[in-house]
Image: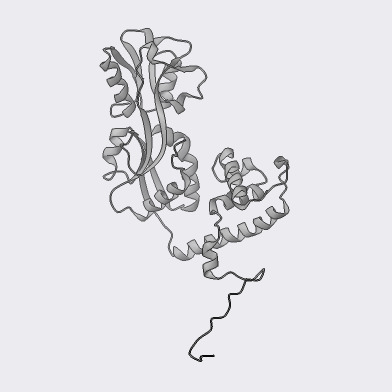
Amino acid sequence: MNPDVQLQPPLRQREPGQPADSKDMLRGRLLAPELLRAFVAVVECNGYTPAAQYLHRTQAAISQQIARLEDCTGIDLFEKPTRQLRLTEQGRVLLDYARRLLALNNEAMDKLRPGVISGSVRMGATNLYATTVLPSLLAEFSELYPAIHIDLQVGVAEEMQRKLGPAFDLTINAFQGGEGNGLLLRKDPVVWAVSKRASPHHKQPVPLALLPQGSLLRRWAEEALTAIGQRWVVVQESSSVEVLKASVLAGLAVGVFQEATIRPVADMRMLTPEEGFPKLPSSEMWLERANRELPRAAKCLYEFLLEQLPPWVAE
């Protein structure tokens, strides 16, 4: 045998229980921390509802996270029926690892953040997000970063876009299709709506309940009616969507809303083009950050929202 030739040792298969090397670990599937946190919360809070309350999420969101974790691992975490909340044998195994992984994650974050992150974040959001989506998320964020103060303001589209940068670090704002930047969160049809028990749409001029000047929905409504020669008058103006819905339900006016806002309202119906109300564009909701260096606190919130807010996916 040529002494200059170095024979490579044969590749060895890893024995069960033997630690993986760094390259093996890079090839493995990752368990998302937020799914593990939901799993541990359900077990320790003894139920989906108390876990949702503890994590400031909806019960549906916790159920979805548990389902995603089961799909990711390929195992059933709880015995059927789930209302008895008994862990399967594999669920008990994962629970131990989940607790250790979460503890290790917290330890790593503490080491990487020698000081407590503090400061203020200035954020603007549409009424829909400020009242239905953000409260629970911001409560969760405040648990993680108790020294960060969030100044959340409800605004209208043009005003928020103008303030992004000078006044706001982040916004969740409404745009016409194709005009937004950042992360697209959702698309919603915009519709005309009236009370099922009233007919203000038959009046002349048409009475409207609208958001303040600068609102995208208001501009679309006024332009659409003007384009067909229909006279209109604003009889109710408010920055609160709940106030506008109350005015419409009382039969005072025709309202303009994102369809998702009024879909659950049983006593309200949408007007159609056949009734003389033109089809309106769809709105897009975008999470956007200021085009400048963000304070550390604002970066933390932005990254948190990127993780927690699912991006819109075309069906």
The residue shown at (32%, 36%) is 178
Side (left or right) of 110 relative to 82: left
Where 199 falls versus 33 (above or below)? above
Residue 179 image-quadrant placement: top left
Colouring: one colour
Q: Which residue shows up at 43% across the image and 63% down it?
A: 115
Residue 217 appears left or right of 77: left
Q: Residue at x 51, y 86 (%)?
A: 6
User: Where does the image place residue 62, in percent across and percent down from the top left?
Assistant: 58, 43
Q: Looking at the image, which is closer to me, 74 or 83?
A: 74
Q: Can you see residue 53?
A: no
Residue 194, given in percent of the width and then of the height, sits at 43, 15
Q: Residue at x 30, y 14 (%)?
A: 233
In the rendered view, tell whether residue 10 sits above or below residue 148: below
Q: How many marks?
A: 0
Where residue 17 appears, as percent x and y from the top left, is: 66, 69
Q: Residue furthest front?
A: 1
Q: Which of 282 and 262 lies nearest the eye of the viewer?
A: 282
Q: Quadrant of the N terminus?
A: bottom right
Kindly tell me whether residue 205 is visible in this rendering.
yes
Q: Quadrant of residue 229?
A: top left
Indicate left or right for 217 with 41 as reference: left
